[in-house]
Image (cartoon, rainbow, N blue to C red):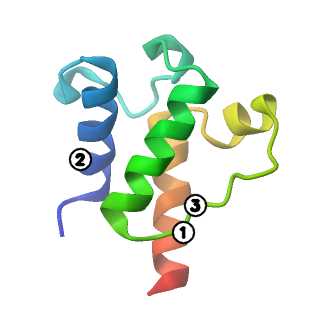
Amino acid sequence: MENIEEKVLELVGKQTGIDPKQIPLDRKFEDLNLDSVAIVELVFSLEETFDISIPFEGLDESEIKKRFYTVSTLTVHLKDLLQKNA
């Protein structure tokens, strides 16, 4: 399987129109102009790509932004879920 960070960056790049190689892992989603709706769409893409469920139902906008703050925090969360489901 492709590197998880690379796949996340690819999906973020697709959503933002930015070359994935130009997106640092510590870049905040809000700095990439991704609001909570765009983050949820990104999560759906990740669920489909990795065939997993990323629980975020019931979280308000501030909680979504806290858990999925940067490319790196989302990647760490995704890695944890993938290890639990392995």
Contact, CB < 8 Å: mark 3 with mark 1?
no
Helix, strand or loop at label 2? It is helix
Q: Residues within 10 Å of mark 2 (few under 14, many from 20)?
A: some
> Toward which corner of the image does residue 36 lie, by quadrant?
top right
Q: Which residue is mark 1?
A: 80
Q: Position of residue 46 (x, y in %)?
A: 40, 53
- Residue depicted at x 46% and y 73%: 82
> In which quadrant of the rendered image does the N terminus lie?
bottom left
Q: Which residue is mark 3?
A: 54
Q: CA distance from mark 2 to mark 3?
A: 18 Å
Q: Which numbered disc flags the more N-terminal residue, 2 or 3?
A: 2
> Toward which corner of the image does residue 4 lie, by quadrant?
bottom left
The nearer-to-camera label among 3 and 1 is 3
- Residue depicted at x 38% and y 48%: 45
Q: Which residue is mark 2?
A: 6
The nearer-to-camera label among 2 and 3 is 3
Contact, CB < 8 Å: mark 2 with mark 3?
no
Q: Which numbered disc flags the more N-terminal residue, 2 or 1?
A: 2
Type of the residue with mark 3: Ile
Q: CA distance from mark 2 to mark 1?
A: 16 Å
Type of the residue with mark 1: Asp
Helix, strand or loop at label 3? It is loop
Q: CA distance from mark 3 to mark 1?
A: 10 Å
Foreground of the two, 69 or 40: 40
Above or below, 37 against 7 in this view is: above
> In which quadrant of the rendered image does the C terminus lie?
bottom left
Q: Position of residue 42 (x, y in %)?
A: 44, 40
